[in-house]
């Protein structure tokens, strides 16, 4: 990968601010109706009063420094939503404020497209949301490939299933979520819903896997409390200097992708980390993998993102 940016080669593409296209919902999938929120006015300040702070363990998950930073990774973050009394500037809406950093989609020698920032990113800062088409995992037969499928598996993270690290401080979800999908006795690990960014989505779809990532995945609930349909946000795991490639751990099950004949599909990992596991872990989907043409990536890239082909 060449490090130097070439302004002549860099191309600004048109698109929407705030991470690109928002979530589209597939036919047959219904988003839950917004749940009631807090009664705070203007901004949420007192965690003893804010009903949303109570859901986060009686505190706000964010500090307002640098426009909002997540204090620590959580099983799930409860943000204020449409039914809350607070306004859009509330710190407990940090992931809803859109892209804050100048991101660049660039070409790598071995991993295809990748993403980096022109700005310094402080630890805990929200980067972008994984957007695309929200669909049932069972309906995936009809999509073009699994390169851009993100399974919404917050439940597995919460329960530490499939080798995922169980995050500390897991709080019981509100009653509605228990009814909607959080069953303590359930050990089944498959995600019921996923986000397909194959044909629509934002810049998150270009972020590659690393075994030593500088981002982490955070499930966020803001307009409802159904964990199966949580929003997927990427946050900075560290202070990230400008031009360092942004990566997260795809965290899927090793050797779970098979060809049609049942043979394991080995996916080499080129993350370059010292502790690289040497294999990109992929999801357990028996799908034909068809790379979609990236001739027109403008559909995925908002206007404050630059695309730069460095090959
Ligand atoms: C969500 S896409 C990421 C963007 C992709 N690089 C592109 O050009 O559109 C996931 C795909 O990127 C490639 N990829 C991501 N991380 C990789 C890694 N560490 N090593 C090799 N290939 C990787 C794989 O082809 C993977 O299926």
Image (cartoon, rainbow, N blue to C red):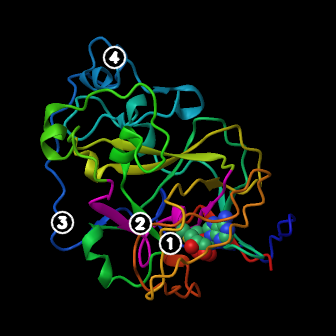
Q: Residues within 10 Å of mark 1 (few under 14, many from 20)?
A: many
Is the residue under label 4 in contact with that under label 3 (CB below 8 Å)? no
Query: Closer to the N terminus: mark 3 or mark 4?
Result: 3
Q: Is residue 15 left or right of residue 8?
A: left
> Which of the numbered marks, if any, corresponds to residue 21?
2
Percent x, y of residue 26: 24, 72
Question: Which residue lies under the disc numbered 1?
Answer: 300
Distance Cα–Cα, label 3 vs label 1:
22 Å
Q: Is residue 35 left or right of residue 124?
A: left
Q: Residues within 10 Å of mark 2 (few under 14, many from 20)?
A: many
The answer to whether any part of residue 143 appears in the image is yes
Specify the quarter for ligand 1: bottom right
Query: Closer to the N terminus: mark 1 or mark 4?
Result: 4
Question: Which residue lies under the disc numbered 3?
Answer: 29
Under circle 3, the secondary element is loop
Under circle 2, the secondary element is loop
Distance Cα–Cα, label 3 vs label 4:
32 Å
Q: Is residue 241 left or right of residue 250?
A: right
Query: Closer to the N terminus: mark 2 or mark 1?
Result: 2
The answer to whether any part of residue 114 appears in the image is no
Distance Cα–Cα, label 1 vs label 4:
37 Å
Q: Quadrant of the N terminus?
A: bottom right
Is the residue under label 1 in contact with that under label 2 (CB below 8 Å)? yes
Is the residue under label 2 in contact with that under label 3 (CB below 8 Å)? no
Rendered residue at 57%/26% (across/down): 65
Percent x, y of residue 12: 64, 71
Distance Cα–Cα, label 4 vs label 2:
33 Å
Q: Quadrant of the C terminus?
A: bottom right
Q: Does 85 appear above or below 233?
A: above
């Amino acid at each position: 990968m060449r490090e130097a940016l070439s302004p002549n080669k860099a191309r600004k593409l048109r698109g929407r601010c705030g991470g690109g296209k928002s979530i589209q919902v597939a036919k047959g999938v219904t988003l839950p109706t917004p749940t009631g929120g807090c009664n705070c006015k203007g901004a949420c300040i007192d965690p003893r009063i804010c009903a949303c702070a109570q859901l986060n363990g009686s505190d706000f998950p964010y500090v307002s420094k640098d426009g909002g930073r997540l204090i620590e990774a959580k099983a799930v973050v409860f943000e204020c939503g449409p039914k809350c009394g607070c306004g859009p500037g509330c710190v407990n809406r940090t992931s809803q404020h859109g892209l804050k950093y100048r991101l660049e989609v660039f070409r790598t020698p071995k991993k295809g497209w990748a993403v980096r920032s022109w700005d310094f990113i402080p630890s805990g800062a929200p980067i972008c949301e994984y957007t695309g088409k929200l669909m049932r995992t069972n309906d995936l037969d009809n999509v073009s490939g699994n390169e851009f499928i993100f399974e919404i598996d917050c439940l597995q993270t919460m329960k530490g299933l499939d080798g995922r690290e169980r995050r500390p401080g897991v709080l019981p979800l509100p009653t509605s979520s228990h009814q909607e999908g959080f069953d303590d006795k359930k050990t089944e690990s498959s995600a019921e819903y996923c986000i397909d960014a194959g044909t629509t989505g934002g810049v998150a779809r270009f972020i590659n896997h690393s075994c030593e990532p500088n981002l982490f995945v955070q499930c966020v609930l803001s307009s409802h409390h159904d964990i199966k349909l949580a929003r997927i946000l990427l946050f900075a795991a560290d202070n990230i200097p400008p031009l360092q490639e942004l990566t997260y751990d795809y965290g899927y099950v090793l050797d779970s992708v098979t060809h049609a004949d049942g043979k394991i599909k080995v996916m080499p990992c080129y993350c370059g980390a010292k502790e690289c596991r040497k294999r990109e872990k992929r999801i357990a989907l028996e799908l034909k993998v068809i790379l979609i043409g990236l001739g027109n990536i403008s559909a995925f890239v908002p206007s404050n993102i630059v695309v730069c082909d460095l090959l």
